[in-house]
Every structure is written in C-alpha cells, then in structure tokens.
Amino acid sequence: MDCSRFIVVEGSEGAGKSTAIKLIQKVLEDKGQEVVLAREPGGTPMAEDLRTVIKSAAVDEKVDPRTELLIMYAARVQLVENVIRPALERGAWLVCDRFFYSTWAYQGGGRELGLDLIKPIHDICLSDMIPGLTIFMDLDPELGLERARGRGALDRFELEQIDFFHRTRQMYNQLCEDRKEMQKIDASKTMEEVHLDLMSLIHAYVD
C-alpha cells in the first residue's frame, strides 16, 4: 500500500524522539493535515498489554530474545491492522514512535539475533508496510542513558549493559547506509540545532 504519509522516528533512549514527533505533528497540522500518532510497542489495548509485559523490569524469569522478538511483532501486527493501515487508507498522516527498524536494531543488533532470523518473520507479518520516511535520532548511548535516568525509573531495556546499546546503535547506522528511506539526525547537537535539522528534513519531505 502507499506508505508515503507514514513517518517513523527511531532512536535509542534519551535521543529526543518525543520532541521530534511533536515537531513533525505541528508541521503537518499547520498544513491542515490530519495527523495520527502511534507508538511501539503499543498503540492498541492488546498491544499496550504486550508493551507492559515486554518492558517490565520486574520479570522474574529469563526472557529469551526470540520470545522478545515474537512479542514485538505480535504487538506490531495489532497496531498496523487497527491503527496504521486504516489511517493511511483514509489519507491521514501517521507519525509513529518506533516501528520495525527498532526490532531490527534492538533484537537483530543488540540481542545479536541477526536479520536473517528476523526477516522471514517480518515478511509474514508486515511485507507491504514500509514507512515513507524513517528518522533515526543518533546519540551516543552513554549520553542517552544519562538522559533516560533523569526521567525516572528505568525499564527492562534501559537496564541492559552498555554493549547492548552500542550494538543497537551500530545496527541503526548500518540500516541508515542500506535503506534509502532512513535519514539520520545528530541528536547530540543543541536543541536549537536539532530542531533546525528536523525542520529542514520534514519540510523537504512533505512540501
């Protein structure tokens, strides 16, 4: 289907995704467009329940990376079929906090499952749903985690060892090189500089 009105913001913890999404929303709404916001994992009642399960730091058993992968795609299918696809079909813009590149980076890179394992599952669940634009907010993991700690209690992912986040970032950067729909923003700049970079990128895409 046509996903040109589907924009995703990716990034590690503390990279400023929420601020970027608000900016994108304002640009589109100022142009008189309907904007639907979504987040992953989550965005529907069932997907939100799965989000609670997968992000809980109180899990008292080892979570196999394959279990994590399958839960992510289960939540994603619910979001796509109940929120994303209907919004795009009626001509709205869909702006999502994370999408499948998060899984490719976190489970494929961070958990070291690799894309060869993930892609067959992806093709079954999501073969025709490629966002028109994915923005990767790139930030050094140490700085990102420092920012995340300032927000309060950390979730199960944020409690991982730093090497996990370096592997995740490496995969994100590799995807930016390989995928033409992915664009990178240096999130380590000042807020004003990041704002300007985002404005330039969004206007170039939507105008």
Image (tube, helix red, strand yellow):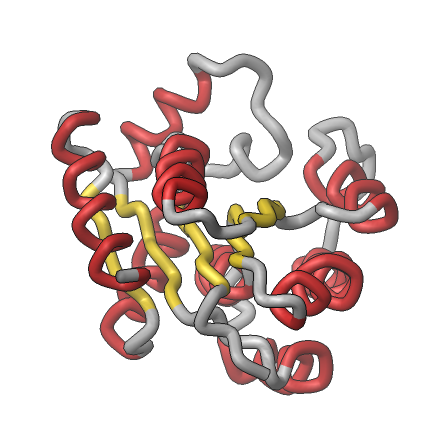
**Would residue 62 be seen by someone viewing this image from the given angle?**
no
Which residue is depicted at the point 28% across and 28% down? 143
Q: Position of residue 132 (x, y in %)?
A: 42, 71
Q: How many marks?
A: 0
Q: Nearer the viewer, residue 122 or 133?
A: 133
Q: Position of residue 141 (x, y in %)?
A: 32, 38
Q: Nearer the viewer, residue 31 or 67?
A: 31
Which residue is depicted at the point 66% across and 59% down? 65
**Would residue 80 be seen by someone viewing this image from the given angle?**
yes
Q: Quadrant of the N terminus?
A: bottom right
Q: Position of residue 121 (x, y in %)?
A: 68, 80
Q: Say above or below: 130 vs 202.
A: below
Q: Seen in the image, is 168 located left or right of residue 170?
A: right
Q: Say above or below: 41 vs 30.
A: below
Q: Say above or below: 160 vs 98.
A: above
Q: Seen in the image, is 40 located left or right of residue 177?
A: right
Q: Say above or below: 178 vs 36.
A: below
* Res 105 → quadrant: bottom left
Q: Quadrant of the C terminus?
A: bottom left
* Res 122 → quadrant: bottom right
Q: Nearer the viewer, residue 19 or 118?
A: 19
Q: Nearer the viewer, residue 95 or 66?
A: 95
Which residue is depicted at the point 35% across and 60% down? 172
Which residue is depicted at the point 72% across and 58% down? 83
